[in-house]
Each structure stands twice: as C-alpha cells, then as structure tokens.
C-alpha cells in the first residue's frame, strides 16, 4: 500500500529489469514484426511506440507487448511471464525473414518513473528534453545516455528508461535525488485493474478470445495477415462473455472467484479483485455474460452490493493536472 500511495500521489521509480526486452534489426525487421503483431507495424518509425498483442493460434492472447521504433530497428518489451514466449516467436520470425534478434535482458536495464509528480522529477534531471516526449513517444536522452519511452498503463505519467547497466545506478540516484522514491512493483496489479489495463498472465485465461478480453482495439483487422488472424476472425461471432470492471462495497476477502449475482441468476464470475485505496472500495476484474456486459449493472458479489463501471474507474491526478 505504501508503494501504491507513492505512485498514485507522488513519484516513484521502479526497477523493471525483470521484464522481457528484445531488439529486432535488419532490412526485413518491420515485415517480420508486421506478420507477428496484431497492430500495423509498417507505420511505426523511429521515436514512436505502440501497445499491441500477439494473437494465439486459438484466437486468444499469446502476449501483450509494446513495440518501440529505433534508428536501427525495433525494441519489443513485454512482462516477465511472457518473455520466453515472445523471445521464441521473435527468433522464429528472424529466421524466416533473415533478420537479427537480440535479447536485451542483460545489456539494457529498465527503470520506470511514475506518478503525478514524475514529470517534475524528470524535468529536474533531464531538463527540457522530456517535454518533447509525447504519449507513445520515444527519445534518446543525450544528457543521460538512455532511451526514454512514455508508455503508461497505470493511469499516471510514466517514463520508461532503457540503458546500459553501467548507467543504471547513477540514473536511479539522480531520480531519487530529484524527489522520486524508490519503490517496488507491488502496487502495479491493483493500479492496472483500476485502469482496466490487462496483464496477459494475470487477467486473460487461455480459453478467452481477444474479443472477450476486450483487446480487439490492439488489432488492425485491415491487415492482410498476421499470426492467428483466421482463428481470431472465426471467434468473432461466438463471444460468450466480456471482461468488465466491477466496484464492490467492502473488503476484497472472498470476492476473487465469486459469482456475479442478479437476484438468483449468475451472470458471470470475478476473475480477481483488489482493495482500491483511492476509491475505498474493492475493484474487481470480471468476466460477465456478453449480453449484460455494460456499465451500470447492479448486482451482488459474495453478498456485497456491486455495480459494473466503465474504464478507467476514476480520473487520475496526472489527467486532472493536464486539464488544469
């Protein structure tokens, strides 16, 4: 909870070096990625990033990834649990297209600066350079010899830094000296649920399709082909459930795995739930009957009053500051 408070209300720096990260380089690197990823990779260029997914051969989600355009190729970033799968698929594509793939796990650190005060911290460390990094933008910061990418999946201002291991400690100390606090990643699961940002391994069962998880926005269906496209198209008409956010009154004990009840009818099930210190309620990620998966549905969960809500669950401080 302390880490949560720091990232939600101040600025925290998190070591994310256990995440997967790979470089793909060569003349056919863009085509190799485009044949694998759901999003259109052919429009991606140096300084631009995108959030997409790799469709499984059953029409589900194999992995959620971020792809960053670099001067000499592309960097693919994913959660630790998906690193082995993503690495294997990238190596397979590299062999087919005659390009090079490099595992950056040991040669590039990964730090994340997040929170409503993160931008001010970044300005103190890097100066005006950070102002030019738009959302889903990337920039080599000459002052620190690191690549800065603004991704963001917990609703607060976020900069992700990638650089040589020898530069890591100096950057970490600079960020802490400028007002950030060094925190762990323990707050990320609940913060991601609050924003309805899905983690493949935590939130998406293997039998759930891309449509049922609600991640079809990460896929460009106009593309001629990508991995799993035919299987995904075949599941378009057979959507049985949809992933929704539900706010539950009271504590989260007994909520995960509980049925969603309307009178005596079960309309779905809670996949996982956390206490939201911001909302002072339990926020749950659920799979609900597709015909009823709309915001505003009143129900009970384990005897507690609950209702489905749209995402995000609330406007974060960073968003409110941007409006002011």
Image (cartoon, rainbow, N blue to C red):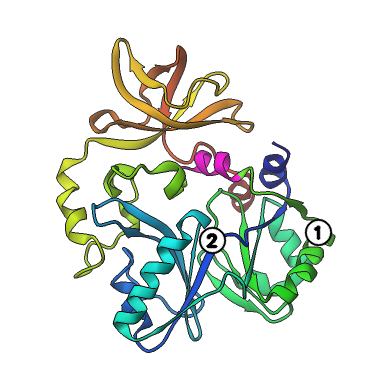
Compared with residue 64, is residue 300 higher up or lower down, i.e. above or below? above
Question: Among all residues in the image, which is located at the extreme bottom?
Answer: 27
| Tag shown at residue 176 | 1
Q: CA distance from mark 1 to mark 2?
A: 21 Å
Q: Is residue 42 among the parts visible in the rendering?
A: no
Q: Residues within 10 Å of mark 2 (few under 14, many from 20)?
A: many
Q: Quick one: SS at disc 2? A: loop
Quarter in which the N terminus is drawn: top right
> At x 27% / y 35%, what residue is drawn?
241
Compared with residue 81, is residue 196 higher up or lower down, i.e. above or below? above
Q: Which residues are magenta?
A: 188-196
Q: Earlier in the sequence, mark 1 or mark 2?
A: 2
Q: Nearer the viewer, residue 242 or 156?
A: 242
> At x 31% / y 83%, what residue is drawn?
97
User: Could you tell me residue 26's position as x and y percent?
Assistant: 41, 87
Compared with residue 168, is residue 95 higher up or lower down, i.e. above or below? below
| Tag shown at residue 90 | none
Instruction: Check residue 193 for magenta coloring.
Output: yes
Q: Residues within 10 Å of mark 1 (few under 14, many from 20)?
A: some
- Choose top left, top right, bottom left or bottom right for residue 266: top left
| Tag shown at residue 151 | 2
Q: Is residue 129 among the parts visible in the rendering?
A: yes
User: Could you tell me residue 18's position as x and y percent?
Assistant: 60, 59
Q: Nearer the viewer, residue 86 or 266?
A: 86
> At x 70% / y 43%, what residue is drawn?
3
User: Could you tell me residue 115's position as x and y percent?
Assistant: 67, 51
Q: Is residue 210 left or right of residue 107?
A: left
> At x 23% / y 30%, what residue is drawn?
291
């Amino acid at each position: 909870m302390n880490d949560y408070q720091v990232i939600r209300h101040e600025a925290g720096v998190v070591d994310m070096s256990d995440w997967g990260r790979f470089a793909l380089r060569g003349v056919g690197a863009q085509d190799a990625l485009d044949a694998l990823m759901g999003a259109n990779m052919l429009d991606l260029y140096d300084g631009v990033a995108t959030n997409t997914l790799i469709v499984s051969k059953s029409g589900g989600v194999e992995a959620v990834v971020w792809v960053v355009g670099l001067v000499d190729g592309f960097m693919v970033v994913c959660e630790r649990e998906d690193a082995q799968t993503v690495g294997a698929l990238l190596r397979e594509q590299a062999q087919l297209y005659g390009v090079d793939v490099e595992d950056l796990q040991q040669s590039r650190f990964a730090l994340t600066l997040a929170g409503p005060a993160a931008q001010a911290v970044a300005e103190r460390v890097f100066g005006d350079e950070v102002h030019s990094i738009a959302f889903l933008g990337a920039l080599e910061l000459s002052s620190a010899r690191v690549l800065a990418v603004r991704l963001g999946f917990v609703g607060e201002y976020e900069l992700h830094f990638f650089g040589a291991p020898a530069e890591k400690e100096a950057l970490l100390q600079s960020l802490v000296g400028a007002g950030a606090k060094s925190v762990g990643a323990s707050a990320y699961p609940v913060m991601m649920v609050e924003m309805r940002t899905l983690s493949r391994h935590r939130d998406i069962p293997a039998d759930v399709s891309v449509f049922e998880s609600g991640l079809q926005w990460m896929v460009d269906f106009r593309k001629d082909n990508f991995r799993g496209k035919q299987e995904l198209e075949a599941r378009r008409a057979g959507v049985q459930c949809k992933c929704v956010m539900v706010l539950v009154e009271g504590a989260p004990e007994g909520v995960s795995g509980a049925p969603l009840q309307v009178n005596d009818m079960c309309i779905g099930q809670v996949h996982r739930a956390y206490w939201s210190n911001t909302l002072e309620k339990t926020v749950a990620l659920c799979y609900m009957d597709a015909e009823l998966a709309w915001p505003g549905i009143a129900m009970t969960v384990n005897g507690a009053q609950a209702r489905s809500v749209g995402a995000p669950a609330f406007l974060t401080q960073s968003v409110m500051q941007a409006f002011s």
